Amino acid sequence: MKKKAFYILSILFAASFSILDASAQTSTDRLLARADSARLQYDYPSAARLCQEAVDQDSTARAKAEDLLIMSQNGLRMMDFCSQPTVVAKQTFPLKDFFLFYPLKNNSWRKTPNQLDSLGKDDLAGAVYIPEGAKDIYYSAEDEDGIRNIYRTYLADSLWSAPMLINEQMTSSSDEIYPMLSPDGKSLYFASKGLYGMGGYDLYVSTWNPETKDWDVPVNMGFPYSSPYDDFLFINSEDGRYSIFASNRGCSKDSVCIYVLEYDGMPVRKAFSDVAELRQLAALVPANDPTRIDNGSAVEDQDPKSEETRLYIDKIKEVRSLRDSVSRFTSSLDNLRNEYSSASDERKAELSATIQEKELLLPELNKTLQASVKELQAIEMDFLSKGIVIDASKLQAKADKEVVGAASGYTFSRNSYGPAPKLAIRKPVRKFDYSFMILPEGRFAENNSLPEGLVYQIRIFTQSRKATIQDIKGLSPVFERQSGNKFIYSVGVFRSYKDVLANLNKVKKLGFRTAEITAWNDGQGVSVANARKLEELRLYTVVIYPENGQSLGEAVMTTIHEHSDKDLVKSVENGSVVFKAGPFENKEEAEVLLNALKALGSVSVSLAESD
């Protein structure tokens, strides 16, 4: 009886803890839901406070809460540096082809999947911008892990270069889309949801550095360009009048808004502390000032602007509209006739009257169409008599364009897709992988020289003849050195004694029972004992590239202090500001900080070694 009572109490005790855990979990979920709602309403102070409560309350939800906390803190900091652009126009378009309404070159958007973006399944990025005559293309495509990165290819002679990633600063753990060069080629705009941001895609700009011949660390464009929603595809118009970007803030799932702003080359930043004011700023309400609008930059127009040409285009549209009407009317009449053949007697009487009525109207519609066609032909004959040469294909294309927003002053004109790209791309030169591996078929090193600095190898055997692939039993990379009439074979390039020791038994298990560790310093053989002493003297530094090019954010500083007590030094290298944490005598300690900073996703980091 006692055992049974004890068993029941145990179950109740465990159940009570389960209920408490579920209650705590539910409470944490509610906190995070409220925090995310506050973030989406631009209430970053409340979002940060609620996230911190969730972090303190439930350690199991720490990772999710900290991610949301970082986004909220980023938004809070960006409230101190807000731009106030003048909004010229705002228009909603379908997500599937909104980019066609940008004032860019016609026939330049190429549908995906295509040669550069072979997958092309991103919800937001459905095309690649490749204008006719381009010799330098920046585009977004998925890597082998399914993450979208920015690549570049350029025309060299008759071949395009093998696509390559831009640089480390513009490559995050999440997606980057819609890279667009400024008209002067000095700025690269793109959207990322993996860099320092407020959630979703934020807008970034990177500036070309002529000294380093590379793109500088990208900077978040801040409010009101970036928001807690998805913001992407930023351009400046070629005439320098407008800045244009798209966002799904306040839109349905299948649509986006295109915002047209007055270009501001020297924006004055202002701190916003009032959430309602920030929300109003981010709403980007048009100024409704016609003097700020110039439709010449909104609509591509390479054709004559004469009255005759305008009338000709209007007549083309009229003829097309009438032909569509006749086609729809005829199709409707055919459907009624088909229904009549199988209808009941009562229904036939009703259908007969309708059919007769439509048959009487059809000749009148055809007559109107024929008259309109004759008027169009008359205009063409008038052009010929006056010696006016017209490009029919261009005028036809212009008549085909869908025009939106004319009533509000700024006209969005729909461009057409261009043909799929056909680029003769140079095949990438595959670099030999010098990582230690055991493969189905072994590989000899392409270059038998060793890298500078301290390295370890595993000597596998020495013999009087050259080794074959079968001799090395799947090891890679195997190095060959000759001493007199003997050939010496070693495998791997290891930077620490710990790494080489961890792989020694793997080599011995393949049958190389006499395998042993050797050491080299700047290509010269040294004893393993001396190598280990040299290794103890090696120092490591974590190099941090600030997101805004000048300073480190609060989240980064907190992470550094939590994972290291080393000095943090600010310096300038190649014209760019960098921060260095260290020195670390132990590589593992340095990597703890390195990985913690990488997990933030808001800064780029690397590990430097020195003796």
Image (spheres, helix red, strand yellow):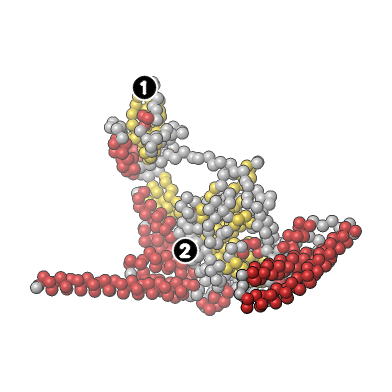
Q: Residues within 10 Å of mark 1 (few under 14, many from 20)?
A: few
Residue ID for mark 1: 464
Displayed quadrant of residue 283: bottom right
Q: Disc 1 marks which amino acid?
A: Ser
**Res 183 seen here:** no
Secondary structure category for the residue under label 2: loop
Q: Residue 436 placed where, x, y %?
A: 38, 40
Q: Residues within 10 Å of mark 2 (few under 14, many from 20)?
A: some
Residue ID for mark 2: 553
Secondary structure category for the residue under label 1: loop
At 37% from the left edge and 54% from the top edge, which residue is drawn? 592
Query: Closer to the observer: label 1 or label 2?
Result: 1
Q: Toward the viewer: 389 or 424?
A: 389
User: In the displayed structure, would residue 353 be above or below residue 505?
Assistant: below
Q: Disc 2 marks which amino acid?
A: Gly
Q: Toward the viewer: 102 or 220?
A: 102
Q: Which part of the image, by quadrant, shows the C terminus?
A: top left
At 33% from the left edge and 29% from the top edge, which residue is drawn? 461
Mark nearer the N terminus (1 vs 2): 1
Q: Residue 59 placed where, x, y %?
A: 33, 67
At 31% from the left edge and 35% from the top edge, which residue is drawn? 510
